[in-house]
Image (cartoon, rainbow, N blue to C red):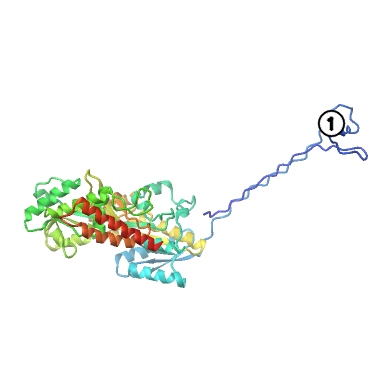
Amino acid sequence: MKFKKLFVVLGLLVIAAMVLSACGGGTTPTNDTPAEEPANQPANEPAEEPAEEPMEEPAEEPMEEPMMDLSGVTISFWHVYGEGDPRNETVVSIVDDFNATNEYGIVVEQFDQGQHSDLQDKINTGLTSGDLPNVTMAYTSSLLDWSTVDAVVDLTAFVNDPDYGMTQDQLDAIYPGIFADGIAPDGTRVAWPISHSANVMTYNYTWAQELGFDAAPTNAAEVKEQVCAAAAANGDGTGGMVWYPSASNYLSVAYAFGADELNADGTAYDFTDQAFIDAALWVADLKANGCAFETESYPNPEQAGRKALITLSSTAGLPYYTAAFADVGNEDDWGFLPFFGPNGEKATDFFTQSVGVLKSTPEQELASWLFIKFLTNPENQAKWIVASGYLPTQSTTEPLLADYVAGEPRYQSSLDLAGYGVAEPQTFAAWSSVRRAVDSAAALLYDPALTAESALAILEQLNADAAEYVAEVQ
């Protein structure tokens, strides 16, 4: 996509040819008829070269046309943060700042649309009615769905544009896992990340030290050792790890073990890789040894009450854990850890808060991209992080969070995990349906009697279910 028209001027080269004039009604020379000598020239002497015709002066290369005029262009931005929510106040503040300071004269109008499901329903309806925003928050999988009906702008050209795009330094600052998210299988970029959260292990440092562990675990075997020690200390079926058999938790362990949901050439789902089996066996072994148990609700109270050394949560759960510890007067030191593989590999299953651009006019599409750049620059992202508790998408935001970390020290343990995120394949076909199948498989795999053979059988059925869902959407 080009936003400046460049005109290429081709110079015309005029080659002067010697013109032989004939006397009277002379004939055209052929192989049989020699040409007559020009008049007034001695025989066998070369004719004088005629004067060269003057070369045509090349036209001056025209000036580049001015950049697209965006003054007065108005775009709409749909989000999911209502009044009374501190995130709403921050969104409104950033929009107002953009309107007041952008050099192009663009005007952004922001609208709260309720929950994600409400926004999604409105856009689905708008695809028929035409009542659509220019920029919208959305799950990556939703943006992919809308792109299949040619409603979503491919942001690749905007990102790479020499005038309006990102510099190489800016691109290099984005965490690799985050940067890969939002790219569809055909290479189009349907989503741009504004922040993210991660599925992590919440760990009680103080209690672990009392149990005899000087440091947090650094691999899967050490995690088992510590949670089993906590379970033995309590002796009532609690104390170890709270495990809920969900897609988020199972995938987090599997990623740390080196798993990938797609086959080697990225053309289909494949959950039968050995890493998926090993991850399932590791979790089942915890249950078999009494080192993992379930709770009926969020495990914040169990964590705060020393009923669990490790619980699993989103980093966005930070304020809820803080409140749970405060409620029982527990001053233990706690924080977040990544999931660990057998050899100390680290991973988290992360969830991206994304925005996309819906198709409209060239002016509105460009204006939408320029607003997204502003919304996600390090300064504005830092404001958003403070309001939301989410994680940044780029390393250049981290230094701007020093004051926030000083006031909420445990956020640093979240920030330390920002670069370990692995994205679910949200842009691969039918992922929403396949993910529900992973939920069901995770429940079946959470079995103390699980073997490698039974795990493989469950995962083979998951493959078959996934293939069926893909066939339905294709």
- Report whether 261 appears left or right of 298: right
Q: Residue 349: horizontal and vertical position, in percent?
A: 28, 54
Q: Residue 417: horizontal and vertical position, in percent?
A: 26, 50
Q: Residue at x 47, y 60 (%)?
A: 367
Evaluate whether residue 384 shows in this view: no
On the image, which quarter does residue 306 sit in? bottom left
Above or below, 26 relative to 239: above
Front-most of 36 and 81? 36
Q: Residue 325: horizontal and vertical position, in percent?
A: 15, 60
Q: Which residue is denoted by mark 1 in the rendering?
A: 47
Q: Secondary structure at mark 1?
A: loop
Residue lying furthest bottom? 129
Residue lying furthest right? 24
Above or below, 16 relative to 365: above
* Amino acid at dot 1: Ala
The mark total stands at 1
Above or below, 46 relative to 438: above
- Report whether 413 appears left or right of 25: left
- Report whether 94 appears left or right of 412: right
Front-most of 249 and 377? 249
Q: Could you tell me which quadrant the C terminus lies in?
A: bottom left
On the image, which quarter does residue 427 sit in? bottom left
Evaluate whether residue 152 shows in this view: yes
Front-most of 60 and 258? 258
Q: Residue 101: horizontal and vertical position, in percent?
A: 44, 60
Residue lying furthest top? 44
Q: Label 1 crowding class (10 Å Cα cut-off): few <14, some 14-19, many 20+?
A: some
